[in-house]
Image (cartoon, rainbow, N blue to C red):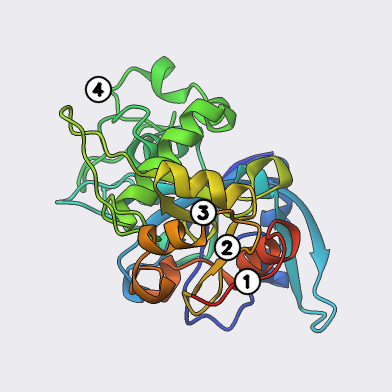
């Protein structure tokens, strides 16, 4: 097993998603080394600004039934975690993925590969920056890494300790998911518009999963909503749901319809992120309507 980088871009011809990575046969032997271990997802610089944006564990490979030259690497969905803090490929000469630098400290041709094997030191840096476990020093252009995969000025024991164990701790994941959701929604409830902040600067709004983690819902912004406490409680119990067009569904099981009318945004239209890639995914919304929503939707 080994850790790696998987490049993904929205305009790609490949059918990637949060639960599977689509790749050509020429990368098969490389992806096989990654199965059972962790990978970082990255958007190439020319395709967007996300850089390194998520981490997950791969659990298997299956052939593409429609193209014998392609395969899918299945993601262990509960391990998928998007970074609250996007990690750029390069910042003022510093590179989180130090192994792309050649002996002269310049970016090598390896950086163009869509699937690449990386040392634990690179994985640790990227994850620490994205999830803010720690912030290790970055290798800079003109300062190539040692054969151990770390700069000589760093403590090789510390940087090589595999930090993937922290990625399965619920406290770590909950904190990262909350930060991601609140940042995306501006600390404002998507259903009520409330943005209450206490004296210590902490937002009242909560990070809600549309499909629960215990049912294999990923820690992805597309499986998340920012909801006030009461609304979150009602959403989890199926008294409220959400359509793909942003219309809030209100169950006839609610005993105070007039009260919920006053609580929700006008015409029960949710305030969702402008960018489609940050809005709830139809897959999770359909699941919530089918498996959680109770009774019939009332017309507000």
- Neighbours of disc 1 within 10 Å: few (<14), some (14-19), many (20+): some
Say above or below: 152 vs 80. Answer: above
Residue at 43 percent across and 32 percent down: it is 147
Q: How far apart are labels 2 and 3 at the CA level?
A: 18 Å
Residue that numbered label 4 is attached to: 153
Viewer-proximal residue among 296 and 25? 296
Q: Earlier in the sequence, mark 4 or mark 2?
A: 4
Q: How far apart are labels 1 and 2 at the CA level?
A: 9 Å
Q: Earlier in the sequence, mark 1 or mark 3?
A: 3
Q: Earlier in the sequence, mark 2 or mark 3?
A: 3
Say above or below: 265 vs 100. Answer: below
Pointers 4 and 2 in contact (CB under 8 A)?
Answer: no
Q: How far apart are labels 4 and 3 at the CA level?
A: 35 Å
Q: On the image, which quarter does residue 131 sit in?
A: top left
Q: Nearer the viewer, mark 4 or mark 1?
A: 1
Q: Nearer the viewer, mark 2 or mark 3?
A: 2
Q: Is residue 205 left or right of residue 252?
A: left
Q: Earlier in the sequence, mark 1 or mark 2?
A: 2
Asked whether residue 245 appears in the rendered view, the answer is: yes
Residue 220 is labelled as 3
Pointers 1 and 2 in contact (CB under 8 A)?
Answer: yes
Q: Quadrant of the N terminus?
A: top right
Residue that numbered label 2 is attached to: 241
Residue at 56 percent across and 52 percent down: it is 235
Q: Earlier in the sequence, mark 4 or mark 1?
A: 4
């Amino acid at each position: 097993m080994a850790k790696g980088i998987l490049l993904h871009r929205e305009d790609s011809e490949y059918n990637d998603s949060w639960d599977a990575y689509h790749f050509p046969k020429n990368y098969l032997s490389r992806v096989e080394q990654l199965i059972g271990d962790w990978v970082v997802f990255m958007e190439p610089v020319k395709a967007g600004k996300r850089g390194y944006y998520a981490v997950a564990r791969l659990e298997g490979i299956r052939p593409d039934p429609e193209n014998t030259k392609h395969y899918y690497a299945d993601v262990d969905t509960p391990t998928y975690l998007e970074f609250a803090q996007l990690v750029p490929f390069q910042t003022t000469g510093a590179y989180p993925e130090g192994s792309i630098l050649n002996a002269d400290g310049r970016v090598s041709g390896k950086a163009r590969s869509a699937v690449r094997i990386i040392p634990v030191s690179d994985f640790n840096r990227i994850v620490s920056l994205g999830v803010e476990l720690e912030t290790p020093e970055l290798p800079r252009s003109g300062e190539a890494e040692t054969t151990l995969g770390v700069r000589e000025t760093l403590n090789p024991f510390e940087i090589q300790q595999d930090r993937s164990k922290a990625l399965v701790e619920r406290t770590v994941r909950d904190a990262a998911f909350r930060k991601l959701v609140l940042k995306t929604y501006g600390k404002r409830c998507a259903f009520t518009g409330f943005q209450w902040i206490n004296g210590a600067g902490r937002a009242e709004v909560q990070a809600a999963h549309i499909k629960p983690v215990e049912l294999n819902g990923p820690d992805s912004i597309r499986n998340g909503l920012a909801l006030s406490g009461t609304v979150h409680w009602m959403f989890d119990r199926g008294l409220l749901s959400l359509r793909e067009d942003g219309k809030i569904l209100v169950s006839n099981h609610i005993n105070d319809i007039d009260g919920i009318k006053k609580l929700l945004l006008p015409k029960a239209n949710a305030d969702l992120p402008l960018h489609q890639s940050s809005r709830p995914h139809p897959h999770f919304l359909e699941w919530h309507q089918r498996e959680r929503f109770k009774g019939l939707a009332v017309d507000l």
